[in-house]
Image (cartoon, rainbow, N blue to C red):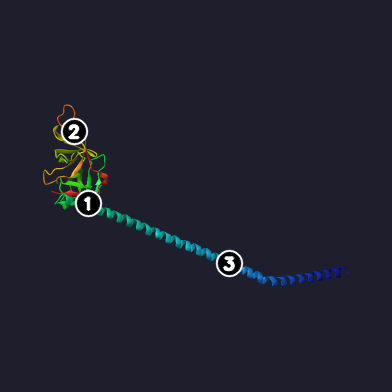
C-alpha cells in the first residue's frame, strides 16, 4: 500500500510540474514577443544614444576647430590693422618732415629712422639708420618735428650716432626769435641747455624762443631749439646765466631729417 501511495504522489507531482511547465510556456508565448520588442527597442535607443553622443562630440570638436580658426583670423586682422595704423602714422610723419624741408628750403637732406638709444647712465645719444653711404657727415644737424634734436657725431657705413641737443658736446650759434640777439648755445643736462657768454646789455627775455643761426652752410637759419626759462647773474660774474628748456623729447623720436653739408 505504501509503495502504491508513494507512486501516486510522484504521478501527481509530475502532472503538476507538466501543468506548470505548460502554463509557463503559454505565458512565455504571450509575453515573449513583447519582451523581445522591448529589448530591441532599448537596444535601438541605446545605439541611437551612442550615435547622438558621438555626433555631439564630433560637432563639438568641429566647432572648437572652427572657433580656433576664427580666432587666428581675427588676430591676423588685428595685426593688419595695427600695421595699417602704423603705416598711416609713418606716412604722416614723413609728410611733415618733407613739408618742413620745403619750409626751410633745405637742399641736401636725408630721412632716417631712430633705431637705438644709449643707456641713460652712459653717453646720452641715439642711433639712426643712415650713414656715410647716405651722404651723412659728422657735424650735420638732426631735426625732428620742426626743431633741432641733435648733431651727427660718429658716422659709420650704414648708421650714425647722434649727439642730442641737451648733451654738453652739442654747441651751436643761435639767435633769440624776438630780439635777434646772437648767442652761443650749449647742451647742459637732460631736457635743458644754456646760453653762454651772454653780456648784460643783450636783450635776452624769458619766454623767447632760440633758433639756429646760419653762420655757415651747415645749418639752416631759424630752426627752433628751445625756450628761455630762467635768467640770472651771480655776483662778481660778468656773463649772465640763461637756462633753456628744449623742445627735444627723446622718447617721441621716430624719424628724423639729417641736414647735410
Label 3–label 1 contact, CB within 8 A:
no
Q: Residue at x 55, y 65 (%)?
A: 49
**Residue behind mark 1:** 96
Q: How many marks?
A: 3
Point out the frontmost of discs 3 and 2. 2
| Nearer to us in this view, 7 or 171 | 171
| Relative to 209, residue 5 above or below | below
Estimate the x, y position of residue 192 in percent, counting from the top left. 22, 38
Q: Residue at x 54, y 64 (%)?
A: 50
**Residue behind mark 3:** 45
Estimate the x, y position of residue 225 in percent, counting from the top left. 19, 42
Label 3–label 2 contact, CB within 8 A:
no
Q: Secondary structure at mark 3?
A: helix
Q: Residue at x 44, y 60 (%)?
A: 64
Which residue is most to the right? 1
**Residues under labels 2 and 1: Cα distance?**
35 Å
Q: Secondary structure at mark 1?
A: helix
Q: Residues within 10 Å of mark 1 (few under 14, many from 20)?
A: some
Amino acid at each position: 500500500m505504501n509503495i502504491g501511495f508513494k507512486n501516486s504522489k510522484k504521478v501527481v507531482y509530475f502532472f503538476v510540474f507538466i501543468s506548470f511547465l505548460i502554463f509557463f510556456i503559454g505565458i512565455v508565448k504571450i509575453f515573449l514577443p513583447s519582451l523581445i520588442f522591448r529589448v530591441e527597442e532599448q537596444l535601438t535607443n541605446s545605439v541611437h544614444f551612442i550615435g547622438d553622443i558621438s555626433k555631439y562630440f564630433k560637432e563639438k570638436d568641429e566647432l572648437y576647430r572652427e572657433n580656433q580658426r576664427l580666432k587666428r583670423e581675427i588676430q591676423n586682422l588685428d595685426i593688419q590693422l595695427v600695421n595699417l595704423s602704423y603705416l598711416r602714422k609713418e606716412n604722416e610723419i614723413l609728410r611733415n618732415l618733407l613739408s618742413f624741408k620745403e619750409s626751410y628750403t633745405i637742399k641736401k637732406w636725408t630721412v632716417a629712422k631712430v633705431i637705438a638709444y644709449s643707456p641713460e647712465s652712459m653717453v646720452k645719444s641715439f642711433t639712426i639708420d643712415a650713414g656715410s653711404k647716405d651722404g651723412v657727415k659728422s657735424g650735420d644737424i638732426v631735426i625732428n618735428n620742426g626743431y633741432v634734436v641733435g648733431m651727427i657725431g660718429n658716422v659709420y657705413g650704414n648708421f650714425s650716432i647722434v649727439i642730442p641737443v641737451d648733451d654738453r658736446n652739442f654747441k651751436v650759434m643761435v639767435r633769440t626769435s624776438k630780439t635777434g640777439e646772437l648767442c652761443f648755445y650749449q647742451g647742459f643736462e637732460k631736457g635743458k641747455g644754456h646760453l653762454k657768454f651772454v653780456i648784460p646789455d643783450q636783450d635776452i627775455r624769458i619766454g623767447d624762443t632760440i633758433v639756429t643761426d646760419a653762420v655757415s652752410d651747415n645749418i639752416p637759419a631759424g630752426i627752433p631749439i628751445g625756450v628761455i626759462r630762467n635768467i640770472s647773474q651771480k655776483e662778481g660774474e660778468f656773463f649772465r646765466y640763461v637756462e633753456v628748456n628744449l623742445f627735444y623729447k627723446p622718447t617721441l623720436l621716430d624719424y628724423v631729417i639729417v641736414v647735410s653739408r
